[in-house]
Amino acid sequence: MPQMLKLSGESKDMTLDEIEQFVKLARAADAPGDRPVYAELSTNGKVKQLEISLGEDAERY
């Protein structure tokens, strides 16, 4: 079963700094650059949560 990296904002919506931190954590976990990133959005389109699957056997949609 693939592992997932999930990060949500400290407040309701994620900031640019939090998105940058997510990318740094994903890169540190050796997530390939072609791996899809999934986002949960609020009703007004702001990013609430990001997630990416990790590992060799992670699904690539």
Image: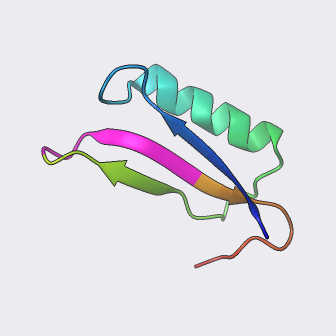
Say which of 59 and 20 sits in front: 59
Q: Find residue 24 and report its horizontal and vertical position in percent.
A: 69, 32
Q: Which residues are magenta?
A: 44-51
Q: Quadrant of residue 1?
A: bottom right
When the figure is inspected, residue 53 is found, relative to residue 50, above or below; the finding is below
Q: Is residue 28 left or right of residue 25?
A: right
When the figure is inspected, residue 46 is found, relative to residue 21, above or below; the finding is below
Residue beneath the point at 75% across and 70% down:
58
Give the color scheme: rainbow, by chain, secondary structure or one colour: rainbow
Q: Is residue 61 left or right of residue 54?
A: left
Magenta span includes 13: no
Magenta span includes 45: yes
Q: Quadrant of residue 59?
A: bottom right
Residue beneath the point at 22% across and 45% down:
42
Q: Find residue 14 and report its horizontal and vertical position in percent.
A: 38, 29
**Quadrant occupied by the C terminus:** bottom right
Say which of 29 and 43 sits in front: 43
Q: Quadrant of residue 57?
A: bottom right
